[in-house]
Amino acid sequence: MAGIVFLVFGLFLVMAVPLAVAMMLGAWTPVIFGAPGISGVGQIIRNAFSGADTTPMIAVPLFILGGVIMSEGGISRKLFNVFAYIFGKKTGGLPIAVLLTTMFYGSISGSAVAVTAAVGAMAIPFLTEMGYEKKFSAAMIAVAGGLGIILPPSIPMVMYSLATGVSTGELFLAGIFPGILVTGFLIAYAVYYCWRKGEDKAKISAAVDEMRKTKFWVVLKDSFWALLSPIIILGGIYSGIFTPTEAACISVFYALVISIFIYRTVPLKGVLKLLCNAVKTYSSLCFMIAFAIAFGRTLTLLKAPDMISTFVLGVSQSKTVIIFVIVIIFYLIGMVMDIGPVIVIMAPILLPIVKALGVDPVHFGIFMVVNLAISMATPPFGLNTFVTSNISELPPTTVFKMATPFIIVFTIALFVIAYVPAISLFIVGRA
């Protein structure tokens, strides 16, 4: 019966039925066939809303709202100015500055799409003006946008915590070094590309010289409040001053204060519009999460976790091989499903398997999120790629093709993270 549920779900996805509806119809299938343990549609609906009615769920819309406010406040440009000031004249210096901006902005917004849109809108026109190929800039930012869900505050990590009970605070902390590692790999390829293809050094030098007419401490002061945001959030969680959900609330107030009163980039009358935009973003996600929880509980009642465990362990008893198989599974699923439902459905199913092999739940959550972050730029439904395609006015296929080398180095970083648990666990004291 679990196989039939997956089949029905897959068929509706192929028919382009909305994801939330496809999950509900899949969960309804056992009711139609009279499967034991599923009392009716009422039980499915109760599972959906009881699963979504939890305190950690509140953090998701708040982090989204904080990211929307930061994006409207032009924070990405202020961060970019600092890194361009430092690295601008080096080989690949401006792409380095863009990637570091993406990393730091990711630690503010918690959303891959928000990072891609905010940094892409600022950086793609500027890099093109500096002589870089537009398709290179669009592809780089599309792939790097995945950093938005690896670094804290990561919305998918909140969902993983919601689905498994693993500490959100530990997940946030564990994502720091993997995010830095992925950024390092992307920077290495960007520098190599710029070295091989060449750069318009005269134009870049002139732009950086113009920027450096302002003293560095002035530029740093301008971006100080943006750089302070992740320190406040992580420091507060790690020190025990507030919980991750409370941190989400604080991030919203902090974003409002610096955007309205310090940077003055968001007018008071514009706050209501930002609230509406955040609600529009979250409302569909909320339904998907709720229905994904109901779908996952239906699969649990049908003993799907046992079936999947038997299948995976039947492939091999080797921890190395099973991690590889799981990475490939997420790679493929991430290409056709939204990250939130994938985590809520699959994490509770696969976590017992990897725990039995000695994999730490925090480490599993991290490499799962890193794995799915790659799918944000891979065809056929890489959302980040479509965002940069719209910004750059290039066909998505052109951006996908140019993104391939970045995806490869991202994938290499993924395997390093998956097979070296200390990268994730060192900071939480379980390396």
Image (spheres, helix red, strand yellow):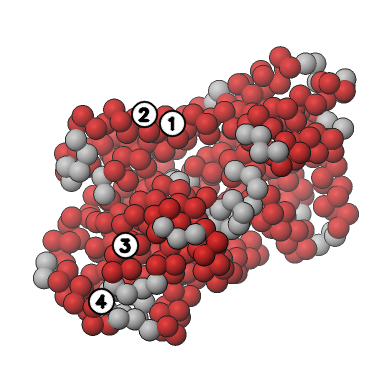
Q: CA distance from mark 4 to mark 1?
A: 40 Å
Q: Which residue is mark 3?
A: 125
Q: Position of residue 312 (x, y in %)?
A: 82, 52
Number of callouts? 4
In the image, is residue 166 above or below residue 211?
A: above
Residue 193 or residue 187, whichever sits in front:
193
Mark 3 touching mark 1, by CB under 8 A? no
Is residue 219 visible to us here?
Answer: yes
Q: Which residue is mark 2?
A: 276
Residue 421 or residue 277, whichever sits in front:
277
Q: Helix or strand or loop: what does disc 1 sit on?
A: helix
Q: Residue at x 87, y 23 (%)?
A: 33
The label shown at residue 204 is 4
The amino acid beneath tag 1 is Lys
Q: Which residue is mark 1?
A: 280
Q: Residue at x 39, y 72 (%)?
A: 133
Q: Helix or strand or loop: what does disc 2 sit on?
A: helix
Alpha-carbon neighbours of circle 4 within 10 Å: few (<14), some, or many (≥20)? many
The amino acid beneath tag 3 is Pro
Alpha-carbon neighbours of circle 1 within 10 Å: few (<14), some, or many (≥20)? few
Q: Position of residue 385 (x, y in %)?
A: 50, 56
The answer to which image quadrant residue 339 occupies is top right
The amino acid beneath tag 4 is Ile
Is residue 425 visible to us here?
Answer: no
Mark 2 touching mark 1, by CB under 8 A? yes
